[in-house]
Amino acid sequence: AARGCVDVRPGSDPAEVGDEPLLIHLKTSAPVAVGRDRVAAARSLEQFKRDKRFQVLIGGSRAKVIVAINNQRKPLDDVRVRRAIAAAIDRKSVIDGAVDGFGVPIGSYYTPGAPGYVDLTAVNAYDPAKARALLHQAGVQLPLELTMKLPPTPYARQGGEIIAAMLDKVGIKAKMENIEWAQWLSGVYKDKAYDLTVIAHVEPLDFGNFARPGYYWNYDSAQFNALWASKYKGEADYS
């Protein structure tokens, strides 16, 4: 999802707003800024909307909240299992439940405000029946038990609970583990000791990560690597 962010400012002068926006894509919690103070809950917005002294502006950003999958962990190394996970998740419901609707579903590692954006939400869309069929085709014995490591942000902790409940409906038991940032950086990002994790990527135009050797989600596609090298040679060096 692409995340959204809200700015609440005194007075009536226009102000730019940055919106904070699952690899399954979803949109996440929006912080509220009142002058220099931040209010964590987006539901607090109504009190400011009713107060004529404040102007509330909502916009979009380049941030993507994803369910990252460790592509080298069995049976997650089977693309049918990864697609089943994607089909089991209702992105819009995650956005509504975890971040009060401040976000938009995206079907790729790309946000609506970026140049050349194409809406791919119909690819691997929410379809629990398809998810169960894909798991059957992959020969997965249910229930499939996985771990889902969640860093200490509301979008991850609250979103993780909703995602786990959705996965459970197709026979995937995601054991949630709440961890701190130091544990996420060392265990997930560095050591790749995880099955699933919920995390926001805020860098714009960073889909070159899929061609990055040894990146934490362990994705490796010779076809994509060749395409990336031919189209963007010299723009990024991940060696």
Image: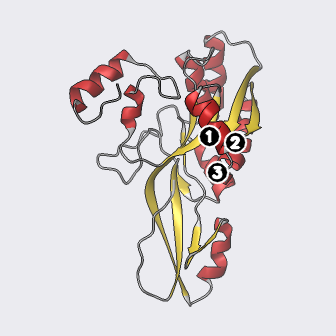
Q: Which mark is residue 155?
A: 3
Is there CB contact under 8 Å for labels 3 and 1?
yes
Q: CA distance from mark 1 to mark 2?
A: 7 Å
Q: How many marks?
A: 3
Q: Position of residue 137 (x, y in %)?
A: 61, 12
Is residue 153 shown left or right of residue 236?
right
At mark 2, the secondary structure is helix
Q: Is residue 8 left or right of residue 74?
A: left
Which of the marked residues, 3 or 1, is nearer the chain's N terminus?
Answer: 3
Q: CA–CA distance between discs 3 and 1?
A: 8 Å
Label 2, on which residue?
A: 160
The image position of residue 105, as x and y in percent, is 52, 47
Where is 47 relative to 237, above or below?
below
Viewer-nearest residue: 101 or 11: 11
SS at badge 3: helix
For marks 1 and 2 on the same chain, the one whose residue lies earlier in the sequence: 2
Which three-letter amino acid code belongs to the residue tagged 2? Answer: Gly
Q: Disc 1 designates what residue?
A: 198
Q: Which residue is at a point 73% across and 36% down the rendered structure image?
A: 164
What type is the residue that disc 3 sits on?
Tyr
In the image, residue 182 sits, relative to residue 218, either above or below, namely: below
Q: Residue furthest top?
A: 139
